Amino acid sequence: MSDKAVLVTGAAGLVGNVVRRKLEKQGRAVVAIDRVDRSADGQPIIPCDVNDIHRLHAVVTDHDVDAIIHCGAYSGPMVARDNPYSMVQVNIVGTANMLELARVHKMRRMVFCSSTSAYGNTPEGPVPEDVPLYPTTVYGASKAASEQLVWTYFRQFGVDAVALRLSWVYGPGRTTDCMIRTLIEDALGRRPTRVPFGADFHRQYIHVDDAAGALLLALDAADLPRRIYTVTGGTYHTLQEIGDIVKTVLPEADIEMQPGADPVDEVHRRFDISAAQRDLGYAPSFDLEAGIRSYADWIASRKPNAGAH
């Protein structure tokens, strides 16, 4: 384990903030950057855009950085849906800038936070990393394109870079569109949840703590036989089954769902995460009930009048 600093991009975001905290807990030097100057928990962050390449070089030089965990990007297909140009600039060019930093400064490793949205609709599972990618959103395409950059920087320049395809991330800190968050907030607010789809639609979630933990495993793995790994929470449930787990955690939840696919989501069969288990030593630490309970506790703590549970 190097005693030099790790650059964490998107350090004010959902995954990046947890990555930063985990590194600090290990006693490691962290250089946290984001577009803002403070995280949600009030920790100072160096304001720096992933597209400001000159500022990025200066930050890396000033802080003796030798590795990167790149979480800084638009965080899902629901974000900037109507601004595809910005999605390309931030997600693809931003990743190219991180790879350039790693190449020019001869860094130990660069870890890229990719997404299962890169797959698009999948064949029958278990789905390995090597199936053809057919993303259906610019967000998914931006992740697939960035993965190709990770691979070619490794092959052409010897940059030790790796991409982790994370499935739907949930848990404390997530405030953007999330079915689990909606179910919890409705239950805490004593509101019924009525969803016109999802009873038979599968979704694979991963708790934010497990997502961040997987990125750290990739940062420190002694050997990387692959350059792309898929990482999920290890579960494969319908949204109705997830709703039933929410009812176990919050008995006041009143949830009804109709059959059918999410009209704005892709159909993902069960992902094969055996490569990450084998090569990175990854194993989810949160089952869905424990993860939903932690998320519900966090949401309730931010809403003092939501009621006890």
Image (cartoon, rainbow, N blue to C red):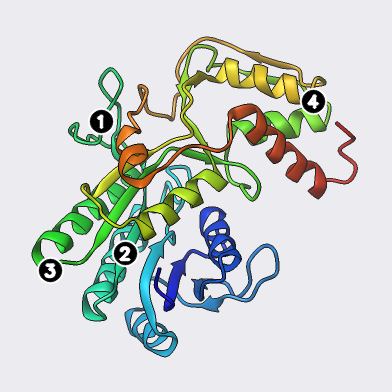
C-alpha separation, residue under disc 3 versus residue under disc 4: 55 Å
Residue at horizontal 59 percent and vertical 31 percent from the top: 179
**First along the sequence among labels 4 and 1:** 1
What number is the disc on residue 128?
1
Residue 164 appears left or right of 234: left
- Quadrant where the image shows the N terminus: bottom left
Q: Residues within 10 Å of mark 4 (few under 14, many from 20)?
A: some
Under tag 2, what secondary structure? strand
Q: Are marks 4 and 2 in contact (CB under 8 Å)?
A: no
Under tag 3, what secondary structure? helix
Dot 3 corresponds to which residue?
157
- Quadrant where the image shows the C terminus: top right
C-alpha separation, residue under disc 4 versus residue under disc 2: 44 Å
Residue 141 appears left or right of 44: left
* Residue 178 place in picture, x, y as percent: 58, 37
Q: Nearer the viewer, residue 178 or 280?
A: 280
Dot 2 corresponds to which residue?
110
Q: Residues within 10 Å of mark 2 (few under 14, many from 20)?
A: many
Residue at horizontal 12 percent and vertical 68 percent from the top: 157
What number is the disc on residue 191?
4
Q: Residues within 10 Å of mark 3 (few under 14, many from 20)?
A: few
C-alpha separation, residue under disc 1 versus residue under disc 3: 26 Å
Residue 62 in view (yes/no) = yes
Quick check: 3 above or below 61?
A: above
Residue at horizontal 50 percent and vertical 73 percent from the top: 33
* Residue 28 place in picture, x, y as percent: 52, 72
Quick check: 222 above or below 130?
A: below
Amino acid carrying label 3: it is Phe
Q: Are marks 3 and 2 in contact (CB under 8 Å)?
A: no
C-alpha separation, residue under disc 4 versus residue under disc 1: 40 Å
Mark in the foreground, 3 or 4: 3
Amino acid carrying label 4: it is Arg
